[in-house]
Image (spheres, rainbow, N blue to C red):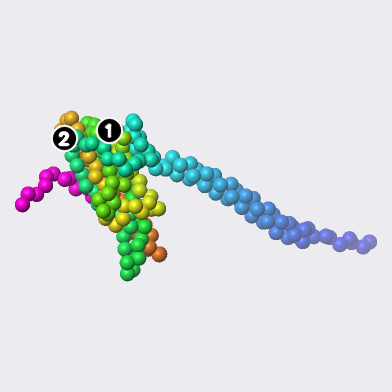
Amino acid sequence: MTDKPIRSNKPDQLDRKPVMLTILSLASLVILLVMLVYLGSKLERLEDKLAYQPPSAPGSNAAGDSKQRDIPLDTNVIYVPVYSHIYATGGTPVLLETTLSIRNTDPENTIVISSIRYFDTKGKLVKEYLGEDLQLGSLESTEVLVEKRDSRGGSGANFIVSWKSDKPVYKPIIEAIMIGKAKNQDISFLSSGRQLKQRIEH
């Protein structure tokens, strides 16, 4: 009686391993792509939520204009130096994006922003950001954006911010943040507002 040869299943098992690995790799890739799409859409929603919105005072002109409002004499006036561009590498202009931040630091009382005016290097009014008074509640903030593509201000631009309150309050913090990029170097710096008190008489 002749014994039948015993067949081994090892070659079939070895053949299946690359197929299983391929399936697992494809499944992992699909899961990764789904996660990336989900995170991307979530990031886009977050960016949309944080997108700049101009101050929304009643009757304010969102587009702004060059017509100057009459400012009451009892307001506080803050001068903020800003730059729509600076110079680098032998006088090459570097365009900057500016965010003007106005923060009510008082934890209890409201302040009123009477005017936010943007002037260019020559002292010409470029834009008035408010059509009417804007109230900032306790610890509330607002901001104004000057985009990089708006180069009207120049290297000597400035904001004049007028504010008031019918109660004693802590002084608001008013400052501007400039950001830009020169070749491979990122640029960012801060400019603080200065209160204009009185003219010096000679």
Q: Earlier in the sequence, mark 2 or mark 1?
A: 2
* Badge 1 density bin: few <14, some 14–19, many ≥20, Cα 10 Å: some
> In this image, 72 relative to 142: left or right?
left
- Residue occupying the point 38% across, 60% down: 181
Which residue occupies the foreground of this view, 110 or 59? Answer: 59
Give me the disc on residue 153: none
- Residue occupying the point 29% across, 33% down: 132
**Residue receiving disc 1:** 133
Give me the disc on residue 74: 2
Which residue occupies the foreground of this view, 124 or 8? Answer: 124
Position in image of residue 117 (x %, y %) = 28, 43
- Residue occupying the point 29% across, 36% down: 140
Name which residue type carries label 1: Asp
- Residue 197 magenta-highlighted: yes
Position in image of residue 144 (x %, y %) = 33, 43
- Residue occupying the point 49% across, 44% down: 44
Name which residue type carries label 2: Asp
Q: Is residue 152 visible?
A: yes
The range drawn in magenta is 189-202
Provide the secondary structure element on which disc 2 rests: loop
Position in image of residue 30 (x %, y %) = 62, 50
Position in image of residue 2 (x %, y %) = 92, 62
User: Disc 2 vs disc 1: Cβ atoms closer than 8 Å?
Assistant: no
- Residue 201 magenta-highlighted: yes
Q: For residue 183, what is the image quadrant?
A: bottom left
Marks 2 and 1, how far apart at CA: 14 Å
